[in-house]
Amino acid sequence: VNAPPLDDRTVAYVVASQPQFEDLRQVAAQLAGLLVLKVTGSRDASPDHPMLGTARTLFDEVRGRVEQTRPTERARPHHMRLQQAAAYLATALAAAQRALASAGDGDVDAALAPLRSAYDELQHAARALPGFRMVAFEQGCCAGHAAAPLT
Amino acid sequence: MNRYSIWVTEYAYVVNQPTSLFVYGAHNQGHRKMPYGYIVIKGPDVVATIDVGYNHKAYGEVLANSYGVENWRPAREVLSEVGVKPEDVSRVFITHAHFDHMGALEEYPKATFYIQERELTKWVWAMSLERRFRWLMLGIDPADIMKAVDLARQGRLVCVDGDCADVLPGVDLHAAFDTHTWGSQYVTVRNDLSSSSQNSWVFSGDLVYAHENMRGSDPNDPQYVPVGLATGSQFNLIMTSEQMTKRAGGDYTHVIPVHEERLKDLFPSRITKAGLRITELALADGEKSRVR
């Protein structure tokens, strides 16, 4: 709340990296969703589930965008968090594919641990700069209150 | 005779929430307080809650600064007002997967959680859609999905498919699909344990936000009016309101919405030192009042 206003280049970084953040969050949610199907015994939980392919495609695309983005000095910690989240998600994706292919639940932990780490990195990123949200509160039952503007 | 003591425990609130959120189409009708709360059900040898609140550590600051959510208090503090500890809770019935209802799962280390399977599978389906469909993910925290994986691995997540009678003696779960969310459920407590109970309570989750949803605004000419926020259909919300009314013995005051500030006008309550309200709906034999 008391942080100094963002400079123009950092604001531009925020605008450019918001979709990256949201896509990484989406990949994390998709993998978590697949693991829920797996551990609750859903018949849909298989390596052929279309969401695994969707997650992989989205991840490959967003990872490239994260690597190409050049942060300002102020945005550097945020960008490092996104890079770390992407690295953890790469591990989680590979492990999730193995988990979905296996008969038991044994491989789920191998996917869940890096997934948690990726989520933690995204949470840190959300705190590092304004304009990043882990949950779409503005569409929930807080909807009556406008979100604070970028400062 | 009451089998269970039942309290509505407030854990945070928004002072000025637009009325249009509570009541569908109520535009330009001002603001009102919106409590956030959960239900505590205490019986012989069992404590259960309906919902658990949100994860303040992860995003309490955002909610406080940007959305006007005030005075959040942890489960240990809130539950202590009715003589319960989080580790006493053995059952939790999750009405739906929004962050303010299932965001604090980790606060209940010994509980088994009950949620409709459809609530999970439809959220998972929504995640697979393209970005332009993201409104369908409203109010969902991916972290809660990861916690659900953990709970399932520990055998502490029960995915219910439809209605489920007597999850505890006299306590039933009722599916309300495609209403506030895809897989919402509400909970009835038949506090006399009778199958044709004359002493039943209905806990609506967010199928009802306020009395107007059950009665409209004209007491002489009541009608059902849906809540102002739904992923599913208004039709289903209205038909579910009728079901809930019947299950409450025709008494709309026994349909309990946790976001309704005016419960205090119907039932005994008190404000805690922290400034949160405890409302007492029923006392089991031998249980002392927590509001007097």
Image: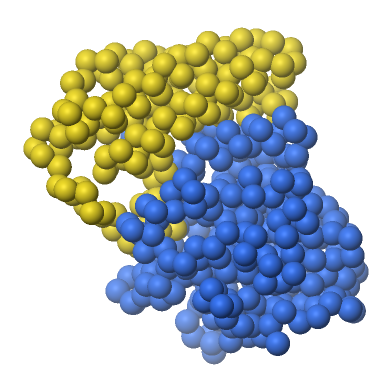
Chain colours: A yellow, B blue
Question: Does residue A16 lie above or below B248 as drawn?
Answer: above
**Residue occupying the far left of the picture:** A8
Vertical order, B193 against A117 (above or below) = below
Q: Where is residue A92 in the image (x, y as percent from the top left)?
A: 52, 17
Residue B125 lies left or right of residue B42; in this view the side is: left
> At 57% from the left edge and 69% from the top edge, which residue is drawn?
B10
Q: Vertically, is B236 above or below B136?
A: below
Q: Can residue B41 be seen in this view?
A: yes
Q: In which quarter of the image is residue A37?
A: top right
Q: Which residue lies furthest to the bottom in this view?
A: B220
Q: In this view, does A44 lie above or below B120?
A: above
x, y percent for residue A118: 46, 26
Residue at image location 33% in from the left, 30% down from the top: A21
In the rendered structure, the answer to whether residue B136 lies left or right of residue B242 reads left
**Residue A113: image location, x then y, percent:** 57, 23
Classify the position of the N terminus of chain B by image quarter: bottom right
User: Does residue B258 appear to the left or right of A3 in the view shown?
Assistant: right
Query: In the displayed structure, does residue A137 sit left or right of residue B275?
Result: left
User: Can the viewer see residue B136?
Assistant: no
Instruction: Return the residue nearer the eye: A5 or B282.
Output: A5
Residue at figure coordinates x 80%, y 66% from the top left: B42
